[in-house]
Amino acid sequence: MSESPAIAVRGLTKRFGPRTVVDHVDLTVMPGRICGFLGPNGSGKTTTLRMICGLLIPDAGEGEVLGLDLSTKRRAIKHQIGYMTQKFGLFSDLSIAENLEFIARVYRLDRRRERVAETLEKLGLTSRADQLAGKLSGGWKQRLALAAAVMHEPKILLLDEPTAGVDPQARREFWDQIHALAAEGMTVLVSTHYMDEAERCHEIAYIAYGVMLARGTIGEVIAASGLSALQGEGPGADRLAAVIEQQPGVAMAAPFGTSLHVCGLDPAALRAAVQPWADRIRFTPAEPSLEDVFIHLMRGATDNSVEAR
């Protein structure tokens, strides 16, 4: 497998009017890696994906995608990227097979019938090939959209919140397919709000309102956050979240079932904050979660969407 990055962008910037939607973002992803792209709504994730695949022209910045210059080789880049958008964009009144046949013609693929049959088989769609796309459930629509995105055998796959509104089993099957594609050498950049999906990625990048705030493996991002955590167990522990979150040294407190999860940046201050309840609630050290880091970063970020109003 190539040692050169599949994606390497530096200072990527995009403005819409007075608002900077993507602000000097750097991102490097190696071939065959699955990179999770996290961030609150309106943070520039979709805009960044569209610049990487050549659909939007950056206002500043530079980079290479598959070794091709992002500013001068957009057409060549597009042919080697599969892009699955947030909304289902195929034809509802065509069957699964007919949709894939259309995609094959768009990409001017050879052996169209064979490629359609191979794609149907690979994505587990053969038994539903004649079913109208508009009659499919969310999970099957998602599978069809993925089939359409990878049919031309791209080297990079961009997925924009691909599993929104899909049931847990369909999500699990989808991610099994993504890992199978990555194992074959495909590079995947996927935006998601689901923490369990982010944890399925090889690495993550966290962007908040256009600014990249964290980058690395799950363990590296959690360690770099500096957060410490305590787990509270005891009668009524889950009902103390609101009052404990107001204590000095507590960044956040959240109930999980009948227990309480408390986070902060200073372990000593965190211990002192929960001490008034230590006579009836047992607090023990716990590992901060990726969700803790996500919320901590989001609360510390400046929402620049106000400037656009």
Image: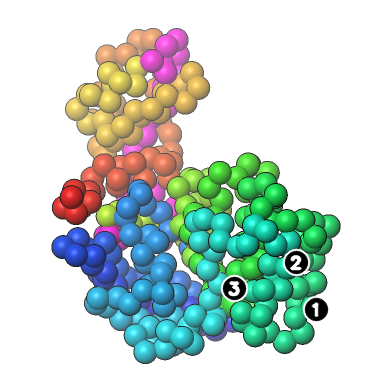
For label 1, the crowd category at 10 Å Cα-Cα, with few meaning under 14, some 14 to 19 and many 20 or more, is few
SS of the residue under disc 2: helix
Residue 31 vs residue 91, the one in the foreground: 91
Label 1 – label 3 distance at C-alpha: 21 Å
Q: Is residue 227 left or right of residue 102?
A: left
Q: Amino acid at mark 2?
A: Ala
SS of the residue under disc 1: helix
Image quadrant for the N terminus? Answer: bottom right
Q: Amino acid at mark 3?
A: Met
Magenta highlight range: 210-239
Determine which quarter of the picture holds residue 70.
bottom left
**Does any portion of residue 82 appear in the rendered image?**
yes
Q: Which residue was labeled with disc 1?
A: 114
Q: Between disc 1 and disc 3, whose residue precedes?
A: 1
**Relative to 235, is 304 above or below?**
below
Determine which of the numbered discs, if any, sits on residue 191 in the image.
none
Residue 277 vs residue 258, the one in the foreground: 258
Q: Nearer the viewer, mark 1 or mark 3?
A: 1
Q: Amino acid at mark 1?
A: Glu
Residue drawn at (45%, 72%) of the image: 29
**Relative to 253, is 96 above or below?**
below
Q: Nearer the viewer, mark 2 or mark 1?
A: 2
Residue drawn at (34%, 21%) of the image: 241
Q: Which residue was labeled with disc 2?
A: 97
Q: Which residue was labeled with disc 3?
A: 186
Q: Is residue 141 left or right of residue 76?
A: right
